[in-house]
Image (cartoon, helix red, strand yellow):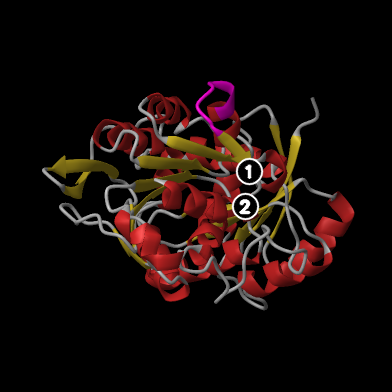
Amino acid sequence: MAKIRVLIVDDSALMRQVLASLLSQDPAIEVIGSAPDPFIAREKIKALHPDVLTLDVEMPKMDGLTFLEKLMRGHPMPVVMVSSLTEAGCQTTLRALELGAVDFIAKPKVDLREGMEEIAQDLIDKVKAAAQAKVRGKGAGGSGAVGKGVGIPLAPGGAMIKTTDTIIAIGSSTGGTEAVKDVLMALPPNTPPILITQHMPERFTKTWADRMNQLCRIAVKEAEDGDSVLPGHALVAPGSYHMTLVRSGARYTVRINQDPPVNRHRPSVDVMFASVAQYAGANAVGVILTGMGGDGAKEMLTMKQAGAFTIAQDEASCVVFGMPKEAIKLGGVDKILPLSEIPAAIVAYVCKL
């Protein structure tokens, strides 16, 4: 098989060297060049035709966001952003994902070389996933989303209000920040409680949850240990923490822990789905969206066996059809749907309960 050809764009010579060294450890990847700024990058893209770009967020002459927006308009291609762990870096990175970047890695705050060594496998995996990703350029309709302010109307007679025992659990990874946004923005404010596990580092989950809270008709927040699980609210698993559902009498809450990673992830979708299967059983809806790997597949089957209704995003609308594909292969999925049809399927199901 042909190697994945990568172009590194970063103003730091050290970072270009570190990224090239780490990516070259994998025999399936070839670093074909680097560029210190977007203007040189543009010429190298034309000359070298890379499969994947790694792009620094903060650069001189033209910032990474401006370059990314221009790239996605004129020459859409898979991009993995290299971000800082600051609040401004989080905001900028989430905007990059909205503009069409496939994924991102976060630079360590101290000891760049050693810190990057620790996330080398994550970097390699994300570049490989990006090489397989479906990239939709800006203005190409995005991910089939509903626009802001448009969504499914309230269920007549407040039918969904009755389903207070129902739990909706959503798991996603690569491409998931935008896919989850599309689902949440379409849901009415009296939707049953939602739990979300999206593979993302610390800090980014809070910034993302706050952004979702501004856009959606339901309330969205990063989960804290002991938070109540309430209708019209969505809780997002914090980066570097698993989130599980627990029940005490008629009341649901979430617990947050730092148990070892599962499927190399913390938070893990499997951990969340397993707890929902245990405590909500047939009063649950499981949704698995775009993402690389198989996290969530095994325990989605457990959810289905417990009587839950399970949905997987279809291949055509996924950025990466890894997690849904694995769940489908295991037989854990009741319905396979395009992303744009998932919110209506959730609402239709919970209204029938």
Observer-nearest residue: 199 or 29? Answer: 199
Question: Which residue appears farthest toward the left when viewing the image?
Answer: 249
Provide the residue designation for mark 1: 337
Q: Quadrant of residue 229?
A: bottom left
Provide the residue designation for mark 2: 341
| Cα distance in 3D space between marks 1 and 2 | 6 Å
Q: Position of residue 31 (x, y in %)?
A: 71, 42
Tag 1–tag 2 contact (CB < 8 Å)? yes
Q: Quadrant of residue 24?
A: top right
Q: Characterize the magenta stretch by its predominant secondary structure.
A: loop
* Quarter of the image where the C terminus is located: top left
User: In the drawing, does residue 65 fall left or right of residue 156?
Assistant: right
User: In the drawing, does residue 282 fall left or right of residue 61?
Assistant: left
Q: Position of residue 102 (x, y in %)?
A: 62, 52
For badge 1, the amino acid type reads Leu
Q: What residue appears at the point 87 percent right and 58 percent down from the top-left corner?
A: 46
Q: Position of residue 112 (x, y in %)?
A: 43, 52
Residue 198 in view in this figure? no
Q: Secondary structure at mark 2?
A: helix
Q: Judge whether 3 appears above or below 316 on screen.
A: above
Q: Which residues are magenta?
A: 328-334
Q: What residue appears at the point 54 percent right and 65 percent down from the top-left corner?
A: 152
Q: Judge whether 345 appears above or below 222 on screen.
A: above
User: In the drawing, does residue 75 fall left or right of residue 215?
Assistant: right
Q: Which mark is residue 349?
A: none
Q: What residue appears at the point 39 percent right and 50 percent down from the top-left corner?
A: 196
Q: Position of residue 61 (x, y in %)?
A: 67, 78
Q: Judge whether 176 appears above or below 61 on screen.
A: above
